[in-house]
Amino acid sequence: MKELKVDPIRNGTVIDHIPAGRVQRVLAILKPRSSDIVMMGMNFSSRAMKKKDIIKIEGRELTQNEVNSIALIAPDAKVSIIREFKVAQKTKVEIPELIEGLVACSNPKCITNAEPMQTRFKLVNIEKRQLACQYCERVFMADEMDHI
Amino acid sequence: MKNLISIRDLNADEILQLLALAESLEKNPAQISLTRRVMAAIFYEASTRTRMSFESAMKRLGGEVIGMVGTSGTSVEKGETLADTTRILARYSDIIVIRHPLEGAAKYVSEQVNIPVVNAGDGANQHPSQSLLDLYTIKKAQGKLENLKLALIGDLKYGRTVHSLAYALAPFEPEFYFVSPKSLRMPSHILNDLSNMKVKFQEKEKLGKIVNEVDIMYVTRIQRERFPDREEYEKVKNAYIISADLLENAKDNMKVMHPLPRVNEITTDVDDTKYAYYFDQAENGVYMRQAILATLLGEAK
């Protein structure tokens, strides 16, 4: 099954190489506006990943910050900005230095799990994808964490 | 320094400044006055020593103390959030000292209020005034912090004090022996951090000759409830008991420290030897906390 099954977009953003099954979580993070036209593809075949999900957003160019916010759940995603049906810019996602309000702390005794507050993590090791909670100081692997 | 939340927030200079102020306050407490300043001691968990040591520190500098211990009878019981409770208390006081069972609570409170916050223990995470008083005690005992050999003994897995102490001493090129039963070893993430900071350490299960090599023995209590089965506890419980006999060939200036309360891990016959230093350590807590309060209230000279 080829990508072309989904209509090409004229202006907007394509997010490719999302791990299969995670497209809804990616969308939940990106929070499309009511004016965005969104196409969502699931379980496309992929040489590198076997199966992948894909999102196309017509009429909106995602900023690098927005792109980075999906880095924890779609670390290998490729983001293309489309202008007049052509790829104007291609970027990879990067885990940001500071991750606020995106993931829950896995320490059940952390204050962030008890008070009505935002979580905050710092990226402490980019290769090992380790995040340190800025409240309880514990360090976690990004892949083990639950998104809010 | 605006708050004291984690020992890891302090650099070596800030630590040395606090130590110097504690030393000078011990000699001459009258040099700083906190008259008409109010400390709110908010203890969500029971604590005698830490709370009374902070209260004594504040009062000896002429300040006043308000506070709560436990949550019974307070607005917390009615479901008030930590943020609200502390925001209100911040209106009544000039500095907050807080102990809370959840990790990161003091940090969170410091973001909610515009007066200084001191972390007096947040669950298993941090207890920086204890780490600072330990450093002050070590410096007083040995005349320096650099290049000391220390044995940290007992429960190294759950012991918050030994974790913080390891970090606090790291900038001063210590050599550590971590002596504990296998099941209560220093957590691997701390050992990794120490390796990254180029700190020398060895893990041991038995005390052996270490006793005669070190400058400081820092003893902690092994709690029965940490062991899943009674038999395992019985096997190790006596392996780390410090007695006067054991210290026979210790270095002349070696000192035994303990965050207290002790149960039987240091026998009472040690109390009368020149090695006993745990009661001095407790007293040092007052000077160190005076230094912390004065610094955060902008009265340090």
Image (cartoon, rainbow, N blue to C red):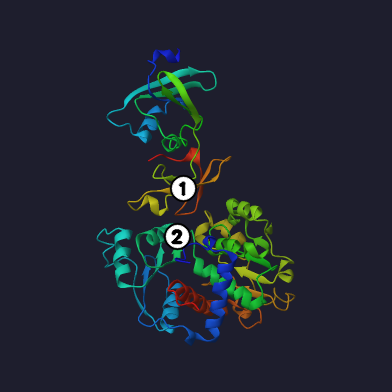
The amino acid type, in three-letter code, at marker 2 is Gly
Along the line of sight, which residue is nearer the eye, B173 or A61? A61
- Quarter occupied by residue B230: bottom right
- Direction from residue A33 to residue B7 in the image, left or right: right
- Quarter occupied by residue A5: top left
| Residue B123: mark in rendering | 2
Q: Measuring from the top left, give residue B248's x and y in whole percent.
A: 73, 77
- Direction from residue B102 to residue B248 in the image, left or right: right
- Direction from residue B144 to residue A5 in the image, left or right: left
Q: Is residue A39 visible?
A: yes
Q: Mark 1 points at which residue?
A: A121
Q: At 50% across and 51% down in the image, what residue appears?
A: A138
Along the line of sight, which residue is nearer the eye, B176 or B3? B3
- Image position of B36 with respect to B219: above or below: below
Q: Measuring from the top left, give residue B122's x and y in whole percent.
A: 44, 61
- Image position of A43 with respect to B85: above or below: above
Q: Measuring from the top left, give residue B157's x and y in whole percent.
A: 56, 57
| Residue A111: mark in rendering | none
- Image position of B107 with respect to A147: above or below: below
Q: Residues within 10 Å of mark 2 (few under 14, many from 20)?
A: many
Q: What element carries label 1?
A: strand
Q: What element carries label 2?
A: loop
- Direction from residue A22 to residue B251 in the image, left or right: right
Along the line of sight, which residue is nearer the eye, A57 or B203? A57
- Quarter occupied by residue A41: top left
Q: Measuring from the top left, give residue B120's x and y in whole percent.
A: 45, 67
